[in-house]
Every structure is written in C-alpha cells, then in structure tokens.
Image (cartoon, rainbow, N blue to C red):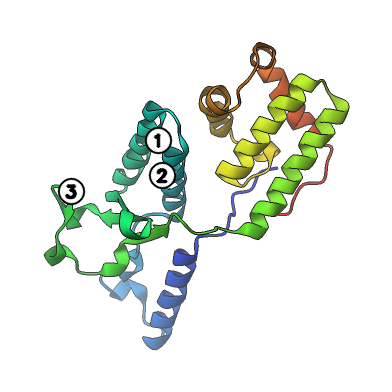
Amino acid sequence: MTRTDDEPPEWARERARELMAAEDDAGGADPSDGDGGDRVPDVPVEVVDEAERLTRLAREATDPAAAEGYRDRRDELVTSHEYAPRVREEDDTLVLYPEEWMESGTVQLDRIEETDRAVEVSLSGPGDPDRYREVAAYNDAVVDAIAERADDVHAETARSFAAFMSNHYVRAVDDATPEMRTEFREEFFPRNGWPTDEQRSALEESLETIERVAGELDEPEP
C-alpha cells in the first residue's frame, strides 16, 4: 500500500482558507499581479511534518547521541528551505522562522514583514486520534495474523515494527518506505525493540513475513 495524500496539518488548512477568502475579497485578481503573497508560508507542508516528527523522535530517544542526530537532521532539512527551527518551551511549540528574520539565533522584530510566514506546530496536541486508532488496529491485526501463521521470532519482531510504524509514522506496516525500514533496522529495533540474538539474525526474514502476511489482510483506508 502506498499513500502520498496524507491530510495537511490544521495550520496549513486554515492558511489555505484565509488565502482563498483574501482572493475572493480581491475580486478574483490575478495572483501574478501581486508581490509574492502566495509564498505564505514558504516551507512545504511535508517539510513541516518531517521536522515535527524528528523533533518528537529526539525527545523520545534514550540515547543522547541519537537525540542529537534527530535534531541535526531536522535542522539540516529546515535550513535547506531557508528556515530556522526553534522549540518554544513555554507552550511546547515547534516554530519555523524564515532565516532572514534571524541574527545570532534570535528573531529580529524589525525584519518581520509578514508574520504568517512563520510556522507553528504544537508538540503537545493529540494529533488525529481516529486515524491513529485505525492504523494501530490494522497493525495489531497483522501482528496477530503473523503470530498464527509464522514462528514466534517473526511475531515478536512484528510487534516492534508495528509499534514503530503506528507511533512514529501513523502508517500501516506494509506502507513503510525504504527509509523507514532502514530507520527501524538501524535505530529503533536495536535500541527500543530489545531483540534477542535469534530476532537479530532473522530480521530480514521477519520484515518479509510482515509484508507477505499484511498483503493478505484488508488495509485501512487512506
């Protein structure tokens, strides 16, 4: 299963509604006549989502080196779009500021011309609980099916992989990208899965078993 049409976060939907309303108020003016107002915010939605994910992973990591690695990946991603990430501790919010607003790590108020170019993502919000429950239930069903049809070693690894995909990506186990599988193999599984030697040896076979058994089950709707 491959899904690339995930729902945008609420801030993006709200901003889209505001832009549509502004266009209506302008009487349908040609956007090319403006001065770049359609650039708000400049950073793509998928970059915001990934920055949020990496920030959460850094918080959850028990290994300081892993946490630093997640933050470095987030910072590199965001700065590649000419934004700077900050976590506002007082209300637990990830904020992405345009780099031109910054100097020595501090926002310069006199450089802010359009406040809507900043992006804020609450790190304390519940997300989409209905979607999470749906995906988690599907992944748990895959684990149960593997427990019935395959060796215990594969079922144990499937439980770890299901937890990883449900909690970190809210995606079905058979919707994992190669990058997600690599992250599971190299980071989550050895640190959080508490694998036995048998599990380590059978990891690739276990992942193939997960894919095969999941393909035999009904998948959650995108």
Label 3 sits on what residue type?
Gly
Q: Residue furthest right?
A: 148
> Residue 182, image x and y in percent?
55, 27
Task: Name the residue carrying label 1.
Answer: 70
User: Would you say the residues marked 2 and 1 are in contact, meaning their CB atoms lie under 8 Å apart?
Assistant: yes
Q: CA distance from mark 3 to mark 2?
A: 18 Å
Q: CA distance from mark 2 to mark 1?
A: 7 Å
Task: Name the residue carrying label 2.
Answer: 55
Q: Residue at x 37, y 82 (%)?
A: 29
Q: Is residue 93 above or below residue 202?
A: below
Dot 3 alpha-carbon crowd within 10 angstroms: few under 14, some 14 to 19, many 20 or more: few
Task: Name the residue carrying label 3.
Answer: 105
> Residue 196, image x and y in percent?
65, 15
As helix, strand or loop, the secondary structure at mark 1 comes to helix
Q: CA distance from mark 3 to mark 1?
A: 19 Å
In the figure, is residue 187 to the left or right of 116?
Answer: right
Label 2 sits on what residue type?
Thr
Q: Residue at x 52, y 23 (%)?
A: 186
Camera sees residue 36: no
Camera sees residue 182: yes
